[in-house]
């Protein structure tokens, strides 16, 4: 079969309403949001590894990119696993591996950096993993603790989201060996700092526009553009918005009649949650 299509597949991201359909074809993997125009297109040449992971109420398909990051798709059933393995082996010459997560609740293990992903392993099995592209800051707290802060996106509809993660790294750690001057926590800190999206939110401003009139949300804002997101700042803290570029579908530049001014219309999916 040259292609396979599955309905009711969620894109593994911060937004819970990313429900759509996925199409597997000889040239790659294509996911499209239901009722919208949001697309995720992964060409065959960009795929390094594919895993299936048992999750509550189904199976997750994890596609690891050659750049080191990963894209996850949720909503498959255990009956789909055999067909998925046969398809990727025939058309991609890739063997799909089954991964199992550790769910015993232990919080003592190993922090492993795999490409652009940080995995926390317990008994050699991943308890969780995060994309280092979502990390906005990495700080060394004391001598033995590394603290990660994550990008905030005001387009998310989730009531709860991960904003901070702390890792205790004892000086006897063998994965990141250190010494009295550079302890293990500092070694891990430097490795994470090199891979995380640090600096885009503080000091990494590319361009800024002051006192722009906005229709939605209504008011006047200062707009700052960073490498991965944009920020709108109003007259008070309640009128502050941070929008990741990954949430932008389209940008329209519309001329205003009999005026040198133009309107800039930014289509978001999902829309911002404030204002």
Image: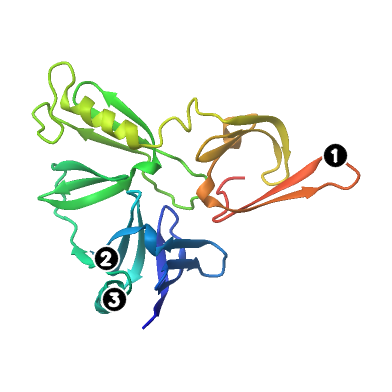
Q: Quadrant of residue 97?
A: bottom left
Q: Earlier in the sequence, mark 1 or mark 2?
A: 2
Residue indicated by mark 2 = 56
Q: Earlier in the sequence, mark 1 or mark 3?
A: 3
Q: How crowded is mark 3: few (under 14 residues within 10 Å), some or many (20 or more)?
A: few
Task: State if disc 3 and disc 2 touch (CB < 8 Å).
Answer: no
Task: Using residue 149 as the reference point, say whether residue 220 is left or right of it.
Answer: right
Looking at the picture, tell me which residue is in the foreground, 257 or 55: 257
Residue at 30% x, 71% y: name it.
Answer: 88
Q: Where is residue 111 in the image (x, y as percent from the top left)?
A: 19, 41
Residue at 41% x, 37% y: name it.
Answer: 197
Q: Where is residue 179 in the image (x, y as percent from the top left)?
A: 12, 20
Residue at 16% x, 23% y: name it.
Answer: 183
Residue indicated by mark 3 = 90
**Disc 2 vs disc 3: which is toward the camera?**
3
Q: What element carries label 1?
A: loop
C-alpha separation, residue under disc 1 versus residue under disc 3:
57 Å
Q: Is the residue 7 above or below the residue 246 in the image?
A: below
The single residue placed furthest to the right in the displayed view is 258
Q: What element carries label 3?
A: helix
Q: Residues within 10 Å of mark 1 (few under 14, many from 20)?
A: few
Q: Quadrant of residue 258?
A: top right
Residue at 62% x, 45% y: name it.
Answer: 275
The single residue placed furthest to the top in the displayed view is 181
C-alpha separation, residue under disc 1 versus residue under disc 2:
55 Å
Q: Is the residue 115 above or below the residue 23 in the image?
A: above
What kind of colouring is applied to the model shown? rainbow
Q: Position of residue 225 (x, y in %)?
A: 58, 35
Which mark is drawn over residue 3?
none
Looking at the picture, tell me which residue is in the foreground, 83 or 172: 83
Task: Using residue 132 as the reference point, say whether residue 273 is left or right of it.
Answer: right
Which mark is drawn over residue 260?
1
């Amino acid at each position: 079969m040259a292609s396979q299509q599955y309905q009711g597949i969620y894109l593994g991201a911060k937004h819970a309403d990313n429900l759509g359909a996925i199409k597997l074809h000889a040239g790659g993997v294509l996911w499209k949001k239901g009722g919208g125009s949001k697309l995720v297109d992964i060409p065959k040449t960009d795929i390094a590894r594919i895993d299936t992971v048992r999750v509550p109420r189904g199976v997750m398909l994890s596609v690891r990119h050659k750049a080191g990051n990963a894209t996850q798709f949720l909503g498959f059933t255990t009956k789909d696993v055999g067909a998925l393995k046969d398809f990727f082996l025939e058309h991609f010459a890739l063997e799909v591996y089954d991964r199992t997560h550790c769910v015993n609740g232990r919080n003592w293990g190993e922090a492993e950096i795999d490409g652009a992903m940080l995995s926390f392993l317990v008994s050699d099995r991943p308890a969780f993993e995060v994309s280092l592209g979502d990390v906005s800051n990495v700080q060394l707290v004391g001598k033995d603790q590394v603290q990660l802060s994550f990008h905030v996106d005001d387009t998310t509809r989730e009531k709860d989201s991960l904003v901070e993660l702390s890792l205790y790294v004892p000086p006897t750690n063998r994965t990141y060996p250190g010494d009295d001057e550079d302890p293990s926590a500092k070694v891990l800190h430097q490795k994470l700092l090199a891979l995380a999206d640090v600096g885009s939110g503080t000091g990494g401003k590319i361009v800024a526009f002051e006192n722009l009139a906005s229709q939605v949300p209504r008011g006047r804002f200062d707009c700052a553009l960073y490498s991965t997101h944009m920020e709108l700042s109003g007259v008070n803290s309640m009128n502050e918005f941070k929008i990741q570029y990954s949430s932008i579908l389209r940008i329209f530049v519309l001329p205003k009649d009999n005026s040198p001014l133009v309107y800039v219309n930014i289509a978001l999916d999902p829309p911002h949650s404030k204002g």
